Image (cartoon, helix red, strand yellow):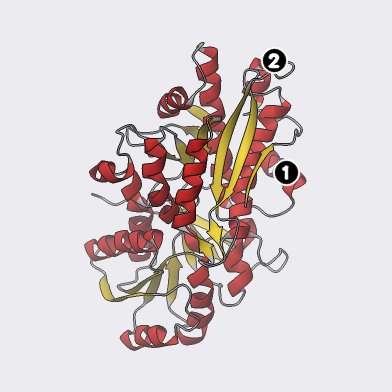
Amino acid sequence: MTTRRAVLIQMPVAAIAGRFALRARPAFAAGKRVTIGIDMPLTGSDAENAKFISNGALMAVDEANAAGGVVGYHIDVLMLDNGTATAGQYDPAQSATNARKMVSDPSVVAALGPMMSGSGKAMAPILSEGDLATISPSSTNPDITDPKFASAFRPMGKVIYFRTVTTDAYQGPGMANYIAEILKAKTIYILDDSSAYGIGLADAFEDQARTNGMTVAGRDRLDPQATDYMAILSKVEAHGPEALYFGGTSEAGIKLAKQAYDVLPKIIKAGGDGVFSAAMLKGAGFPAMEGWYVTMASPYISANPDVQPWIARYKAKFGPGLSAYSFTAYDAMLVILDSIRRVAEAGKPVNRSTVRDAIQAANVKTLQRVVSFDKNGDIANKVISVFQCRHRPQFADDDVLHQYQYVGVAPHSSS
């Protein structure tokens, strides 16, 4: 379902979003409204995590509107769901439809999302044709911003796809380095979930694992809609690897974690940010999730004392649900809002072209410190954070911030 809504006014923020309060007019100027599209899989297996990510973005909009808007501009949100019941998760075809809806609405000057790389691949060429920039807080497939694929994903030439997370060109190798250098495993079996994200992440992991001298005992692809992975897991067991790596999201990941616990209870298990979610914790549960290593394509900031007031405001507004990418979604929206501000203060028309140019030149203080982008739209900061799932019964089983415990930064590849 497509809905358009003006975001409800909430209490203003005192620190980061305070820039809007300082520069804002006391009331919205008549007729000064712009729209930001948000595209997330609000239906299917990733819906809960998508809601948490969307909340981070909406919080930034609410704070800006509460402060009088961005230089007097009221910010409206066009919220679009790219999940479908048929797919059971995000649907690239629906993502493409959503991109067309955003492009066809002349009030939309920028977008936030998508959450998944498969959606990003479907949306990018349409957004390029419409000269509409988007910032993804969580999609990590490197192809979308790789200049080698510019003709496919930015056919009109200008960069329109930006991110507040780094890509799987760093996330996959980061975990491969961690498993080889820190966990000292020498043999690995690799699985992916058939998605653009899962395949790309597993490919990047495999390349670096081999570079590190690890033996790749095998590689298989899971059908996310299948219910039984026991035949593949039995094959993994027969090869006797020291570790298992999974590139994919919760639809396949939940079933994999449950069944791997029974078949492979003692080997190292690891995955990417698709395994870092409330959906995984809730669906697979404990003890199945105990011990899993996962990466996030962003710095670890939730323990930073400076971020605690933001977490408190988020929980007061939305409740306890929070994702690590709630932070990067908030940051992405801050960049969009700051870009609108800079365009308006320069006396330029606030439209897609001027906002896109401002996003490209962003240098914005956010929760993860300063966000800026390279010439391809990728975030300058390439830090990969590593976590291990360790059950802490004093917290809710699906409490992402407490059940995944930070263990360090992934070692950088030497190349």
Provide the residue designation for mark 2: 25
Residue at image point 62% right, 37% down: 77
Left or right: 401 in relation to 156? right
Query: Nearer the N terminus, badge 2 or badge 1?
Result: 2
Nearest to the observer: residue 123 or residue 138: 123
Q: CA distance from mark 2 to mark 1?
A: 27 Å
Nearest to the observer: residue 251 or residue 379: 251
Compared to residue 358, the image places residue 39 above or below, namely: below
Left or right: 414 in relation to 83? left
Left or right: 74 in relation to 339? right
Which of the labelled discs sits on residue 252, or is there none? none
Residue at the extreme top? 347
Left or right: 170 in relation to 324? left
Whole-percent x, y for residue 35 in the image:
59, 32
Please state which amino acid type lies under the numbered disc 2: Arg
Please state which amino acid type lies under the numbered disc 1: Ala
Q: How many marks?
A: 2
Snapshot quadrant of residue 312: top right
**Neighbour class for label 2 at 10 Å: few (<14), some, many (≥20)?**
some
Whole-percent x, y for residue 216 in the image:
27, 73
Residue 136 can be seen in this image: no
Whole-percent x, y for residue 291 in the image:
52, 71
Provide the residue designation for mark 1: 312
Q: Say if mark 2 contacts mark 1, CB within 8 Å.
A: no
Residue at image point 23% right, 67% down: 213
